[in-house]
Structure formats: C-alpha cells, structure tokens
Amino acid sequence: MLNKIVSYIIPLMIIFIIICAIKDKKDVFKLFIEGALDGLKVVYSIFPYILAITVAMYVLRDTGALNILLKPLKPILTFFNIPQDIIPLLIMRPLSGGASTSIVMDIFKNSGPDTISGKMASVIMGATETTFYTVTILLGAVGLKKSRGILIAGILADITAMIIGILLVNLGKI
Amino acid sequence: MSKIWCFIIIIAVTIATISGNVDTVISSIMKGSTASVENVINLIGMMCFWGGMFKIFSETKFLKVFAKKFSSLLYLLFDKKELNDKSIEYISLNITSNLLGVGNAATINGINAVKELQKINKNQDRPNNNMTTLILLNTASLQIIPTNMIALRALYNSTNPSAIIIPIWIVTICSLVVGIIAIKILNNRVI
C-alpha cells in the first residue's frame, strides 16, 4: 500500500514542477532544454572518472586481487551478512560521486537492483553525499584550509548511514 | 583519490603477475572500459532529463517562497549572533534546494552562503560554528525524493524502483542526527 503511494511521487512531482513554471509564465521548454544540456555536460565531465574507476574495479576483481585482499575480512563480512561487491562502494562513496555511481551501476548490472547487494547499494548511495568533495568546494570558495571537525562529523554520518542501510536490508525491511 | 587509484592498479597487476594470471590484466581492462561506456550511455538520458526538470524547478517562484517560509527554522541549528540577513537568505535557499534535489542551485547558494558568513567571521583563518554546521548539512544527502537513484533502478529493470524511498529517509535521518550531534560536540572542542 505504502509502496503504491510512493510510486506516485515522481509522476506527481513532474506535473507539479511544470504547473508551477506555467503559473510563473516561464518558457518551460527552453528551460528544459538548457537544463538537459547542463546534464549532458555533467555526464561529459564525469565520464573519465567513471572509466578510471570501472577499469580499476574490473582489474581488481578479474585478476583475483580483490579476493586475496578481502580474505582476512571474510569472517567479519559473512558474520554481518555484507556482500563482497558493496565493499568498493563503502570506500569510494565519500571520495567521488562519479566513481560511486559507476560502482552502483556495475552492481545493478551484475547482480540486479532488487538483490541484497543491489538494495544495499541503492540505500547507501541515496542516503549519503560525496563528503570530501562537498567540504573541499565550500571551504575552497572562501580559501579556508582548516576544516575543524567537519570531516570527522561528515564521515561519522556516512558510516552511520552505511551501517543502518546494511542492517535494514539484512533485517528484510526493504 | 589519486593514491587509492594507483594503489588499486599496482596491487592488482602485481598480484596477477605473481599468481600467473597476467592475461587477465589486458582482458579486464578491455571489459572494464567497455562496461564504463555502456554505463555512461545508460546514464546520459536520465541525467539530461532530470537536469532539464530541475532547471525548470529552479526558476519557479515556489522555490523562493518555500525558502522564505523555511528560514525561521534555521535558528534551531545556527547561532543568531553570527548571521546577517543575506546569509540567512542564502542558507535557506541552499537547504531548500538540497531538500528538493536541485543540485546546481544548492551548490551556488551554498558557496554564496559560506562567502557571506566569512565576511562576518571573527577569525578569518578558520570556519566559525555556523559555517561548520552549514557545510555538514551539505555533506548529508537531504534530498527528499532520490530521483536519480529511482531512475537508475528503473533503468536496470527493478520490479519496484521507488521501494527504497522510505528506507533512504530512515537512513538519512539517522545519519543526519549523528552528524549534527558530532559537529555540535566538535564545535566546542576543536578550535
């Protein structure tokens, strides 16, 4: 029932945005085209990151290096029921948006979005931000180098999101 | 980032060489680059569509009116003494854009807000408590409806792409609470 309601949110949001803009007498189509071009520029500028990370992930996995590196962690991962393929996402999420997007897409492609790792990836990706990048941009805008506690607090928040995301999926709440 | 990437490549190639899997290096590079192109082709349409939608949204009066109403809530988190009118306006526009998922508008208003706060910052070489709080809020994913994630799930044939909305809310709220408590504690400890 709740899921049924939730699936109406996006269509309603699209109608709402368009009606708001028509009411304000904006050139809706022109704005859409401008924004779509911005979207294209974003994809254009993150593609090199996506390439770099996807290749690195494939090399790490296919050569068997990932298995060897994660071997000491195996008992912990099986105990908490954490699938191996989301480990790269946990490490990359605070560092790079493009990299984590490509890891998520790869999980979706290889395991599917409705599997345990697919659901964990969806929730973790949707509930966190690129912490390091955001802090760098905002402090960089005023030329400040000292960040005081921001990075620690941001990373603590990210770790909380990861733990609770994994717990929710493992408890079968999603 | 650079160190991590170099580490991954060097470790992977070294392990492959030692264990006699040298052939997999080339084949995995090829598979990886092909996969990255496939992934990005899938991404283009979705990014452009939501880019267009949110561009329309960012120009509506609704966003500004909502931000104005929202500004009275700011005093819960920010120190009144170190805010001026301009910074209140930018902070509320920044948070509203984050909530509604208008990423570009959020970044621009965030930068303007930090600049405005720096003007009244007593100690020019470090961020004050309002700045640390604002930046922390920006590192949490406040977006109410995770449109990108839902679109991405739909793209890879999820049977219920929006099933993750409520779990994402729960997780975001928990991590936000932890983040805010941490920054409030650290604000008093780290000078």
Image (cartoon, coloured by chain):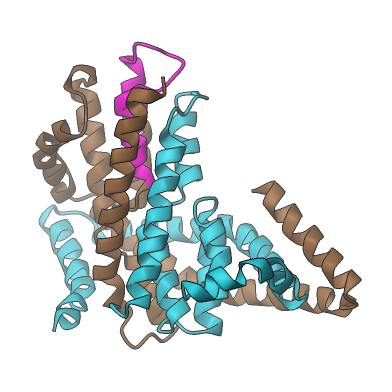
At a point 52% along the width and 84% down the height, the residue shown is A111
Relative to B160, residue B171 above or below: above
Asked if residue A135 lies in the magenta stretch, the reply is no
Q: Hue of chain B?
A: brown
B165 horizontally vs A126: left or right: left
At a point 25% along the width and 52% down the height, the residue shown is B99
- A153 or B142: nearer the eye? A153
- B65 or B33: nearer the eye? B33
A48 horizontally vs A86: left or right: right
In which quadrant of the rendered view does residue A23 lie? bottom left
Q: Position of residue B87 (x, y in %)?
A: 25, 26
Asked if residue B117 lies in the magenta stretch, the reply is yes
The part of the chain drawn in magenta is: B114-139
In which quadrant of the rendered view does residue A87 lie? bottom right
Q: Position of residue B171 (x, y in %)?
A: 30, 61
Relative to B151, residue A92 above or below: above
At a point 21% along the width and 20% down the height, the residue shown is B84
B104 horizontally vs B42: left or right: left
Q: Position of residue A16 (x, y in %)?
A: 15, 65
Q: Which chain is cyan?
A: A
Q: Position of residue B6 (x, y in %)?
A: 75, 53
